[in-house]
Amino acid sequence: MAGLSFRLAGPPDWAAIWPIWHSVVAAGDTYTWAPDTSEEQARALWMPPPPAVTVVAERDGSVVATALLKPVQPGLGDHVANAGFMVDPVAAGGGIGRALAEFVLDEARRRGYRAMQFSAVVAANVRAVGLWESLGFEIIGTVPEAFRHPTAGLVGLHVMHRSL
Amino acid sequence: MAGLSFRLAGPPDWAAIWPIWHSVVAAGDTYTWAPDTSEEQARALWMPPPPAVTVVAERDGSVVATALLKPVQPGLGDHVANAGFMVDPVAAGGGIGRALAEFVLDEARRRGYRAMQFSAVVAANVRAVGLWESLGFEIIGTVPEAFRHPTAGLVGLHVMHRSL
């Protein structure tokens, strides 16, 4: 995607990640984290120690999206990756999410993960579900009424998966 | 079950929980945690801060099993519980696991959870899968090849669920 670059993030990137993180989580319609999650809590959640890695997408020198790649389980399940993605709402809709996801899928392969699993995709988030399906993910199952959506009420959370 | 009692655990109970926890996790066939998980790591995993609660089952004054009850998701998904169960291998097979599970299901209801979800039930652990099904849980889906079993190789992890 023209003008877009991706790299692993370090501690100095948090200042640019936090406004995006906060915008996405405060909306309360895509992630289970409490909408009022503090910056300190958010940083611990989004920039955990290795083997997790945090990724940023930059355009014209500005961070426009971020991702977290980590094992979905510790120990005997750590060959399956988990990832989360957040695009700056101001920049969303232009293909940044897809390009970032493709980068993270490649990064997961490079790190030796054999598959990727999402454990809590909000069923009402049809754009995200469609994006993941177009990238080869399948819905393995749906936990009913597992998410309190701000306008849709209790909605399901999909478990999605693809091999790498 | 005759002679068996259940209660919430506190910090002094850890000394009795740890040998059970270690025996179960070191076997490497039912939990994803690394078989060599240290005592310090184990304590943080099994006795996390509220709203999580740790439970012990006692018989003749000795701890013979333990459980962890917590939200499966934070924030907007914290109305669904998650639980883990461990029975002392020396005492296993006499119905302790079922009795402990029934206590924890009641405790979850008392705490206002609307459902319970297990996110990683080892598919090869047919006794556990059968117990959960007999207690009203359904397999929502199975993440393929998500667990490195010590003898069966790569096996699936079931996501299981029941309403409360």
Image (spheres, coloured by chain):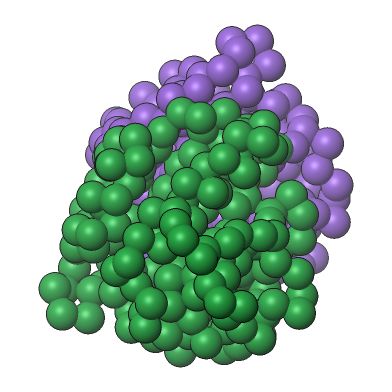
Chain colours: A purple, B green
Q: Is residue A65 above or below residue B60?
A: above
Q: Is residue A159 left or right of residue B156?
A: right
Q: Is residue A118 above or below residue B125?
A: above
Q: Is residue A43 above or below residue A128?
A: below
Q: Is residue A135 left or right of residue A103?
A: left
Query: Which residue occupies 52% across, 87% down?
Result: B19
Query: Which residue occupies 19% across, 58% down?
Result: B126
The answer to whether any part of residue B11 appears in the image is yes
Q: Is residue B164 above or below residue A85?
A: above
Residue sitting farthest toward the front? B2
Query: Which image quarter holds the N terminus of chain B?
Result: bottom left
Percent x, y of residue B36: 46, 89
Q: Is residue A101 left or right of residue A22?
A: left
Q: Is residue B2 left or right of residue A43?
A: left
Between B18 and A47, the residue placed more toward the observer is B18
Between B43 and B64, the residue placed more toward the observer is B64
Percent x, y of residue A42: 76, 51
Please tell me in which quadrant of the rendered image residue A59 appears. Answer: top right
Percent x, y of residue B66: 54, 67
Query: Which residue occupies 42% across, 48% down?
Result: B118
Between B164 and A149, the residue placed more toward the observer is B164
Total marks in image: 0
Percent x, y of residue A50: 58, 75
Residue sitting farthest toward the left? B152
Between B57 and A102, the residue placed more toward the observer is B57
Residue sitting farthest toward the top? A151
Query: Which residue occupies 35% across, 60% down?
Result: B95
The answer to whether any part of residue A160 appears in the image is no
Please tell me in which quadrant of the rendered image residue A101 appears. Answer: top left
